Amino acid sequence: MKKILFLTLCLLALGWTAGMAQNPTVEVPLRFDDYYTYDMAVAALQALHKAYPRLTRLDEVGRSEEGRAIWCMTVNNPETGEALGKPGIYVDGNIHGNEIQATEVALYLLNYLLTNHGRNEMITRLVDTRCFYVVPMVNVDGRYHFFADANTSSTNRGLRRPKDDDNDGLLDEDFPDDLDGDGNICMMRRRDPHGEYRTDPEDPRLMIRVKPGEKGEWTMLGSEGIDNDGDGRINEDAEGYVDPNRNWGFNWMPPYVQTGSGDYPFSGVGLKALAEFIMQRPNICMAWAFHNFGGMFVRGPSTKAQGEFHPTDLGVYDLLGKEAEKMVPGYRYIIGWKDLYSTYGDFTAWISNTMGTYAFVGELFARDQERYEQKPDAREIDPDYEEGPRFGANPAQTRDRLKFNDNLTHGELYRDWQPYDHPTYGPVEIGGWVKMSARLPAPFMLKDLVHRNAAAVIYSARQTPEVSLELMGTEALADGVHRIQLRLVNEKAMPSMSHLARQNKLYPQDMLTVSGDGCTVVAGGRLTNRFTGDVSYKEHRPELQFLTVPGFGTVEYEFLVKGAGPVTVNYTSAWAGSRQMTVDVK
Ligand SMILES: [Ca+2]
Ligand SMILES: [Ca+2]
Ligand SMILES: [Ca+2]
Ligand SMILES: [Ca+2]
Ligand SMILES: [Zn+2]
């Protein structure tokens, strides 16, 4: 009965907010002094598209499990060429439903690029020569429910694919419950002389773990909730759980190896649609996926077994990662499997290993930035922290956070303990940290976070390949044969194809072709020494050369052409676009 009432209320709430959501007011320029709900973020994208119709495209990538649209905004200036002919930078966020400020970073990037095009010289040039694909919300159901429902800062991460976590035949039947109706899932505690906690003598709102031999005062009963299905367990079967960042089709492992990977790769319908959308854009050479734990720029590989990247690719990662560290103080550039943990079927491993893309996970937010008092040890990663703020792990840190709550947010982040008569536990107290208290900057700190991280993306975009084609010279040889020497110069750090893509033959290399109606290419190959004139000739089809232009590098080619007339030189690259020139030989 309770369940039916609850469902009815939910449906009413859904219908009501859907009705409300038709026209949330969002104006350009966007604001970054608070968080957008799912509907407002969609309205923000629509507002940007309306304000900049020439520079933007808004595509529905696909639909989520609950039928919400996943949007991609493409920023490209059609006057300087089509999107696929330019280096592509892909940015997404909020693949974990609770990691909401990732969306704000993506929206800020869009807003910044668009409002500065035609105003700031560097951004104008960037927008005119590159193309951006931005998916601010991957887990759209997750973002919707994080705002609409009571949650902790760490719940509602997964996909809305019903799964029976406790094998009782019911699917997703026992979420945590907002018992006191304040919109948050807080903690429950009960007085207990045999408990593991006692009241913190320095701040009675907090608890600290008892030492061996000390008398206890409290038992922590976990998140706010009751036994919804009467099976004797509380909060045991919430949404999913499919982790949308473990469900991608590269190096995927079943749930007995890694929890949350789903029944098979791309079982998430929105993820599958997104993968197909990305694969249709082979110009994507750089990818950023934003999350919200700990202040880190994480590169692959995501498992040890994949080995280390080739020095060519490492050089690119190191440059981008080390510069990003300087742009976002407190963040660290690290390696996934080595400095964090191994992941199977995660997004960045998928995009780098199937598309050859350079990819970073941007883990937003560093706790030391919101600490009340800066301490050198604050930059250490606290393994308990990802699970949300717990009690007793580090009392000094917890006290600092409570002072931050008191003196900088004036009590917004913490609920004082209040009595509640629990159907299973009897007299308990509900209180503690609220939904927006952890993993997210307080709204007053949001703008700094989104700007700095968007700047890291912009820096990486500036390092995508920029290749020019130059004629080194022509020379008439005997018997109507001409020598044509050509040079390809890359001004930027990123090669025109990653070493990983080249080594694993993910797609054809760049091509340099020479052709003309009145002539035949009799020989052609790479000019290995421009001073001695050494050429490594290609045995077959000399008119077509396969190559990669290295980062901050050049490659040179020589062709011997018999005949006369205009000769067309054509360079094409999946990442660097295409270049053409005509050379007249007589
Ligand atoms: Ca169940
Ligand atoms: Ca479940
Ligand atoms: Ca239950
Ligand atoms: Ca159950
Ligand atoms: Zn995440």
Image (cartoon, rainbow, N blue to C red):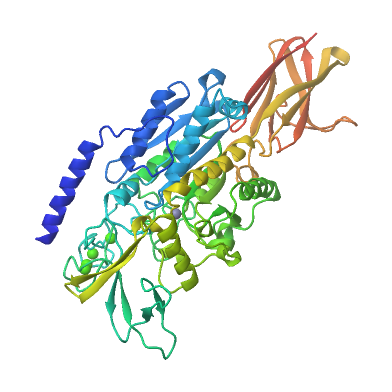
User: In this image, 219 relative to 510: left or right?
Assistant: left
| Res 18 quadrant in image | top left
Q: Residue at x 45, y 50 (%)?
A: 249
In the current view of this chain or complex, which residue is farthest to the left? 1
Q: Nearer the viewer, residue 38 or 585?
A: 38
Q: x, y percentage for residue 399?
A: 45, 68
User: In this image, 277 relative to 228: left or right?
Assistant: right
Quadrant into which the C terminus falls: top right
Q: Does residue 416 lie above or below 329 as drawn? A: below
Q: Does residue 62 lie above or below 584 as drawn? A: below
Q: Residue at x 51, y 67 (%)?
A: 382
Q: x, y percentage for residue 148?
A: 27, 49
Q: Nearer the viewer, residue 448 or 518?
A: 448
Q: For ligand 2, which image quadrant applies?
A: bottom left
Residue 237 in view: yes
In the current view of this chain or complex, which residue is farthest to the bottom? 213
Q: Residue at x 58, y 67 (%)?
A: 377
Q: x, y percentage for residue 252?
A: 45, 56
Q: Residue at x 66, y 45 (%)?
A: 316
| Res 545 quadrant in image | top right
Q: x, y percentage for residue 511?
A: 65, 29
Residue 484 in view: no
Q: Nearer the viewer, residue 70 or 520?
A: 70
